[in-house]
Amino acid sequence: MKAVETNLLKFLQGTKQFIIPIYQRKYSWTINQCRQLWNDIVRAAEDEKIKGHFVGSIVYIERGLYQISSVPQLLVIDGQQRMTTLTLFLCALGKAIEESGQTWDITRKKIMNYYLVNNDEEGELYHKLILTQSDKDTLISLISDKKLPEEYSQRVYENFNFFLENIKNSGIDLNKLFQGVSKLIVVDISLDRDNDNPQLIFESLNSTGLDLSQADLIRNFVLMKLEPKEQTELYTEYWYPMERSFGNLNDSALFDRFMRDYLTVKTGRIPNIQDVYAVFKDYVYQQNELTVQNIVEDIYRFSKYFVKLAFQSEKDKEINQVLTDINTLKVDVSYPFLLEVYDDFEHQKLSKADFIAILKLVESYVFRRAICGVPTNSLNKTFATISKEIDKDHYLESTTAAFLLKESHRRFPENEEFVQELFIKDVYNFRNRNYLLRKLENFNRKEIVDIEAYTIEHIMPQNKNLSPEWRQDLGANWEEVHKTYLHTLGNLTLTRYNSELSDRPFKEKRDLEGGFADSPLRLNKGLGKLDTWNEDEITKRARLLADQALLVWEYPLLSDDVLSKYRKKGSEGESVTYTLADHPDLQGAMLTLFEELSKRICNLDSSVRMEFKKLYIAFKTTTNFVDIVPQKSKLRLSLNMAFHEINDPQGICKDVSNVGRWGNGDVEVGVSNVNEIEYAMFLIKQSFEKHRDDE
């Protein structure tokens, strides 16, 4: 590597061509960043004390092993953003000089020939800077002063105009402005192909991660190490089509999410969104048998499933409708599971009917939990790991069993709980209110009703000051009825006549043109035959709608014999249930100590459950947070935390991260008498809180 501090204009002079590799992101500097550069140039121009202003480094390497061109071609590894912006500034300055009609020390022709083009060359070699994709043609058009291409780069064009307008409107002497540019300093860093690793240098130069997204880093990592010909082939065939499917990555957040989900599928662990690049590198290094092309092909394949999930672009209308419903529920955490199922469907490991059944299973699971108010903090782990519980020779059956066997925070609410919560839930203020009413209205209906064209109607009005007619209909306890049932499912419907219906008495709402008796909606079926609306009618209608909801969001049925096949097996393949009797050390004083401690642990929260295992007793919320191994003289506790996370003022905890122990976690502590329970609970609560709040 050779690094030399040099003058920017001197650096640009001479016959050479800088090429932005295809794996680099598009030009992305904003007006704010251009304004900062403009201010720096103006300051250098107007302050004679400033001898030079540093604008950053430009790192490059020879394009290939063999140079067949007379013009040295250099791949820019780092610095493309500032280099492009400075080129735009020089282009704008040249145009402003020419349009001014005055004579200056520098001319547009000199700016062109010295800094923007290779005057003796033709074709693409004529240009000193070659950008990527649409950026390239836009810059060439501006430098050549020709019409913009049909699909031009808005960012390149906007920034060029920003500089042109500022130069023309600032009133600054153009000679001085050129002197300001002449003071700019860069560090010229040329790499040696034989001795330098461009990827490592690129990472160290961008270690802050402020400018580059995870998507940028991954693309560069995958393509940078290849020869230009291979880069072009992989980029053109896989990466560029993938970027286009993600909206050309104008917002890289969606691609970062996809890569997190892709890595979750591949590793079984959920990376932090900020660590996606690091986890991806580790994953690639472990795939010794795969080429870069194999990995890029695989990413591209899964990206197509992700795009179908995120944008509902599946060509099969029946599948796409279920994807639309799932997307409405905003349950992105299900994507790792659905990506794998999609891949298996594409590879014909399950039929279309079974694929749709699994999609609807996910939809019912998520929606029932939402209605029942089950905490969502375990959903990401559920969907990240559930595929491990599936027997792909019996795909639908084992998937159904995996969901049905979930407990506590991960449970699939049964019909009784679902109906009970539907009756009392404040549906009007429920996030998925429109989805709920749309699905109920359109169940088994071929002529689909677009409910977005309708508004929510409270049959019993929202107005607390109910009219005498309403008070009479509702009865003596009308205030309590109003308070209890106002926003519930039984009292809500859809209409396009909301303003006409308003707070009118029920019979007027019924008989009005466009009223309940005149409505084509199934949700209003039956309302036109009623003479009054009261607590009894609200609960009757709620029951009818709840019965229909059981058909829309079905609870899957499997026999106990089938479910028992998928319950966790013992060492000999039979289902094993352990009890207190399997722990002979729990007797006398130790049993009393255990009963007192376990009671305290279970009282932490209603979600806590105790399970007897073969060698320890587990206490769980979203997962095990403390395990107790009974011994003759003490209870040995394993807290499911990293040792550095525990707050232990008494210093009695042991780090067992590298020690083989029964139980989960790296923190061990012993409890030998009831006087130690209080401090033990202080420690246990830390593990409980960690896993209860774990996202």
Image: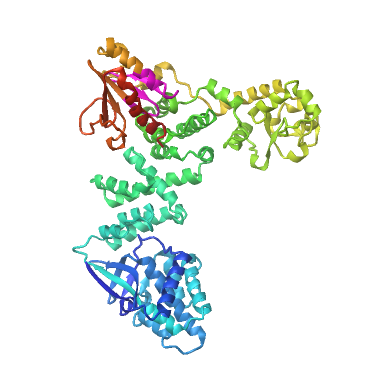
At a point 51% along the width and 81% down the height, the residue shown is 171
Q: Is residue 107 above or below residue 167?
A: below
Q: Residue furthest top?
A: 588
Q: Residue furthest bottom?
A: 103
Going by the image, does 508 lie left or right of 586?
right
At a point 35% along the width and 25% down the height, the residue shown is 681
Q: Is residue 531 visible?
A: no
Q: Quadrant of the C terminus?
A: top left
The front one of 646 and 265 is 646
Residues rendered magenta in the picture: 597-626
Quadrant assignment, res 229 = bottom left
* 566 within the magenta span: no
Task: State the image coordinates of residue 184 (x, y, percent, origin top left).
Answer: 35, 75
Q: Residue furthest left?
A: 195
* 624 within the magenta span: yes
At a point 65% along the width and 39% down the height, the residue shown is 451
Going by the image, does 148 lie left or right of 645?
right
Task: State the image coordinates of residue 557 (x, y, percent, origin top left).
Answer: 48, 21
Q: Is residue 216 above or below residue 100?
A: above
Q: Is residue 366 visible?
A: yes
Task: State the image coordinates of residue 440 (x, y, percent, origin top left).
Answer: 61, 31
Task: State the image coordinates of residue 583 (x, y, percent, origin top left).
Answer: 27, 14
Going by the image, does 277 lie left or right of 421?
left
Q: Quadrant of the N terminus?
A: bottom left
Q: Is residue 363 above or below residue 111?
A: above
The front one of 608 and 293 is 608
Quadrant assignment, res 334 = top left
Chosen colour scheme: rainbow
